[in-house]
Amino acid sequence: MKIFSRYMALQFLKPFLYGLGLFALLIFLGDLFDKLPRLLKSPAPFGIILQYLWLEVPYWAVRVIPLATLLATLIAVTGFVASGEWAAVQAAGFETRAFLRPLLWMAAAVTLFSFVVQETVLPACYARSQSLWRDRIHPQWEWEKYPDVILTGGSGQFITSRNFFPKEGRMERPVMDYYADGRLVRQIDATEATWDAPAKRWVFRRGIEREFIGAGPPRERPFRALETDLDTPPLILVPRRKNPDEMSFRETLLYLRQVRFLGASPREAQTALYSKLSYPFANIILCALGLPIALRLRRSHRATTAGVALAVGLLYVWFMEMSKTLGVAGRLAPALAAWAPHFVFASAAIYLHRKTEI
């Protein structure tokens, strides 16, 4: 690496790490204060709560990486102006775009880093933190009733129920389907199902068992009580919507296929899939946007620079979250929902570059 490139990388890296720590801490504390009443009332040991809080750190750090990239760009460029380096570069006839290009390369490196962390560290830590929250800190089975649910009992085993009461270990109007090679091979359609704790089995009552063989009509056998092979306890069977942040890109793709297989709406999974691809590129776009903004700020105080970075970065994040919400709601196509904010801010960056002498 050339001395110049190493110098520029250092000028970017110092404020980047500072901004990453600052913004992550601020947002983490805000989330902590929001959850504090439930944490104080939780029966979980103090060690579990500390583990949960620590595992939340990577999530907030990844979320604020674009803000830190923007802050690093603003501080680096305003620093060049304040120190006279920018004037010296212009006086020496050095191409200013070439002078600032290493900052864009650093933003590209941050984009790659963000994608790697998003695919490795983040899913593992966030999945564990959410598991602690659901199982130890704020148990989901405190909820009394789940209406119109789809449950997964095992490989190729799916249950739909009009009402599921996990505390009571009871289902109303359950239908359990068995699939093999993508084909329905067996179905248990009952009025009610109850959990038999001694036998560790679900017992379906007053229904019909169907076997699907070939293209003909199914074989049907009525029953009053049928002990099934479903051995998942009620509290483990509790339906839990998978958060995209708990999954890598590959896991999200598999989850999307599962959602489609169950006949549920795939919009949320599709939007999450495209968002995982698009989110890291916010670093490059915010860096490109930060260059002309920094030259307009010139000799502004660092507090002003940090305020501008926070305002522009949060506006960008707000646009991304709003766009994702519209994608999940079906108001925007999933791909458009994930990439539209990037197109808007990239257009703003191009406009400011043309209006600013760089």
Image (tube, rainbow, N blue to C red):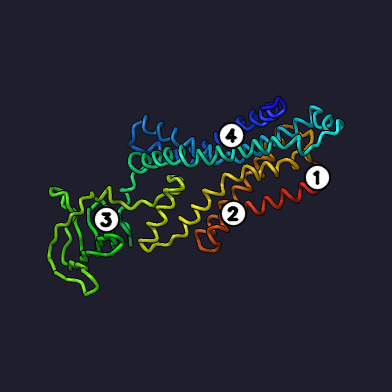
Query: Could you say where residue 238 lies in the image, as x and y percent from the top left?
Result: 30, 51
Mark 3 residue element: strand
| Mark 2: few/some/many CA within 10 Å (<14, 14-19, 20+) | many
First in sequence: mark 4 vs mark 2: 4
Residue 349 horizontal/vertical position (percent): 72, 48
Chain-order first, disc 1 or disc 4: 4
Q: Which residue is mark 3?
A: 165
In the rendered view, would you say 143 is above or below 174?
above
Of all residues, the one furthest to the bottom in this rendering is 217
Count of picture labels: 4
Q: Choose the circle earlier in sequence order: 3 or 1.
A: 3
Viewer-side residue, 213 vs 339: 213
Q: Amino acid at mark 4?
A: Leu
Residue 163 seen in the current view: no
Q: Which numbered disc, 4 or 2, marks the residue closer to the eye?
A: 2
> Which residue is at the far right?
91
Q: Residue at x 20, y 72 (%)?
A: 218
Q: Are marks 3 and 1 in contact (CB under 8 Å)?
A: no
Which of these two is toward me, 328 or 143?
328
Q: Residue furthest top?
A: 3
Mark 1–mark 2 Cα distance, whole angstroms, equals 26 Å
The residue shown at (56%, 47%) is: 279
Q: Is residue 348 visible?
A: yes
Q: CA distance from mark 3 to mark 1?
A: 63 Å
Please tell me which of labels 4 and 3 falls first in the chain. Answer: 4
Instruction: Tell me the quarter of the picture where residue 52 sits.
Output: top left
Secondary structure of the residue carrying tag 1 is loop
Give me the C-alpha separation between circle 4 and circle 2.
24 Å
Residue, disc 1 = 356
Amino acid type, mark 2: Trp
